[in-house]
Amino acid sequence: MEIKTIHKIEKQAYKKSHAEITRIGAALFFLAAVLAFSFATSGGVPNNLFLAIAAVFGAYMAMNIGANDVANNVGPAVGSRALTMGGAILIAMVFEASGAFIAGGEVVSTIKNGIIDIEGFGQNTDEFVWAMMAALLAAALWLNLATFAGAPVSTTHSIVGGVMGAGIAAAGFTIVDWGTMIAIVSSWIVSPLMGGLIAAGFLLAIKKTIIFRDDKIGASHKWVPVYVAVMAWAFVTYLILKGLSKVWGSFVGALNWLPLVSIEASSKPGFVGAALAGLVAAVLVFALVKRNIRHKLPQMNNDRHSVNTLFTIPLIFAAALLSFAHGANDVANAIGPLAAINDAIMTGGISAETGIPFWVMAVGALGIALGLGLYGPRLIRTVGGEITELDQMRAYAIAMAAAMTVIIASQLGLPISTTHVAIGGVFGVGFLREWLDDSNKLENTIRQEKTDLKDEKKQLNALRKELKSLQSKSGKSVDEYQRITELYRLIDEEEEAIKKAKKVLKKEQKTLFVKRDMVKKIVTAWVITVPSAAVIAAMVFYMIRGIMV
């Protein structure tokens, strides 16, 4: 029997190692292809070696964005079982790449969020190129480490930290816009709080209007179309503001070719126009969902499971739209510095904004899709089920928080991180469940058991200390020998009691709706992302300069 068990373990280990080697091989093949293409297309350009290496760094960064950041878009849908892991990865890969290619834009800022002043480099193009290379590699390395640790972190904050650290290493602390950095730090608090409150608010509304009602079927027919319509409004508005902003001018120009249509051309969509488009979509979705639920009513049971199924299709669309908007926006985290390096090498100067060659966009888009396919499942599982248990209604609330928070924050001018918003939404849903289920009693029980466990350990230490003292004594009496025997028995009993207490404590901690260890790990990773990426970037910059000078 033991031999069979060992054989099974060996087979599983072999499969796992074989899959890991395959993933590493695919990633290395992509990096090698990027390196070869960059060399082949820039053969006559001075410093083309730097461009080729920077292209590899950009590809590596893009893969890490796909492995870490995309989990926020599809994780709740997978955790709620609205999507399978394979389906979620396929949808995210297609829509992330589509968002990057279609709406990734033709121009990006060379310095993410304007956190450093490029004037600080003067006309020293070489140091600018080295700094951008260091920023890319540092951000990618930090994301790789966070993904390995199972911590979803902000890719924007990673590249911000990389650019800041490399900039300081190149030109000193005065190059940094510290006002912008303070705003970024404030997003560590603003983003998860807004996401958590909005997600908890939507989930509470669903519970009060549907789940807590005796007639759940009638309540679903009345309220689910409203919630899905609100979702349609939010996501169409979000998509226009964040996903289509870079192609808005072309879209408006195309519409003006239609008869009886005259829309004032603008380079970016305004909130009012986006909200009106979202409202039109919401009305159409309301009518469609209302009719669809009416047809389903005879087959529905008056329970929570039936209500949950009504949110499945909206969640699939939400995952797709979030992925599209993410691909359109966050591809700049990978290709912004790469585009800056390409422009600096090709022109010999430093620009605040630069055009994006198609091959640079392709590196970002394909890298994100590949990274998601190869290493995305680890973080998808974390977001989807390792923080709190999700179903379709809870996942809906989280998706709504992601869209609504971005819309509200963009109008108020508040800096936010979409990663922090999504994870904050998961936290909000979990803590609302605890509040509704009166789990404070459970927390108090756990706290008391921890105290009792500490007391047990103190008592065990006292017994061991007494035993050690008696054993070291010479010329022991009969009573002392009897006491030593009794101490051995008491120590064994105490160790067994502690062992059982630990098991009970561990079991009760698992029944908490939000896993506290995951909260601590994720929040810690958020706080140290910018400084960690900055330190790594500075080290990489000094290493590059040391080699070159």
Image: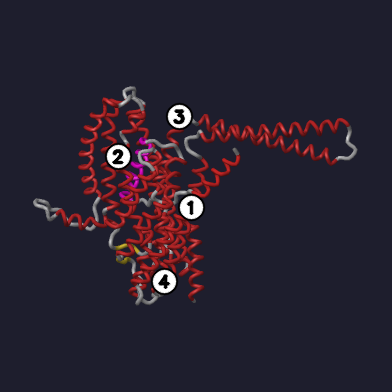
SS at mark 3 in the image: loop
In primary-sequence order, the first of circles 3 and 2 is 2
Q: Residue furthest top?
A: 214
User: For this view, does 368 lie left or right of residue 14?
Assistant: left
Per the image, the residue denoted by label 3 is 437
**Amino acid type shown at disc 1:** His
Mark nearest the camera among 1 and 2 is 1
In primary-sequence order, the first of circles 1 and 4 is 1
Per the image, the residue denoted by label 4 is 50
Question: Cα distance, mark 4 to mark 3?
Answer: 58 Å
Q: Residue furthest left?
A: 259
Question: Cα distance, mark 3 to mark 1?
Answer: 44 Å
Question: Cα distance, mark 2 to mark 4?
Answer: 46 Å
User: For this view, does 184 lie left or right of residue 539?
Assistant: left
Per the image, the residue denoted by label 2 is 314
Count of numbered marks: 4
Question: Cα distance, mark 1 to mark 4?
Answer: 34 Å
Q: Residue at x 39, y 53 (%)?
A: 66
| Residue 497 x/y as whole percent | 67, 32
| Residue 417 x/y as whole percent | 39, 51
**Amino acid type shown at disc 3:** Asp
Res 296 quadrant in image: top left
In primary-sequence order, the first of circles 4 and 3 is 4
Mark 2, other Cα within 10 Å: few <14 / some 14–19 / many ≥20: many
**Amino acid type shown at disc 2:** Pro
Mark 1, other Cα within 10 Å: few <14 / some 14–19 / many ≥20: few
In the image, the segment drawn in magenta is 392-412
* Contact? badges 1 and 4 (CB < 8 Å): no
* Contact? badges 4 and 3 (CB < 8 Å): no
Mark nearest the camera among 3 and 2 is 2
Please say whether residue 455 is one of the residues in the magenta stretch.
Answer: no
Per the image, the residue denoted by label 1 is 18
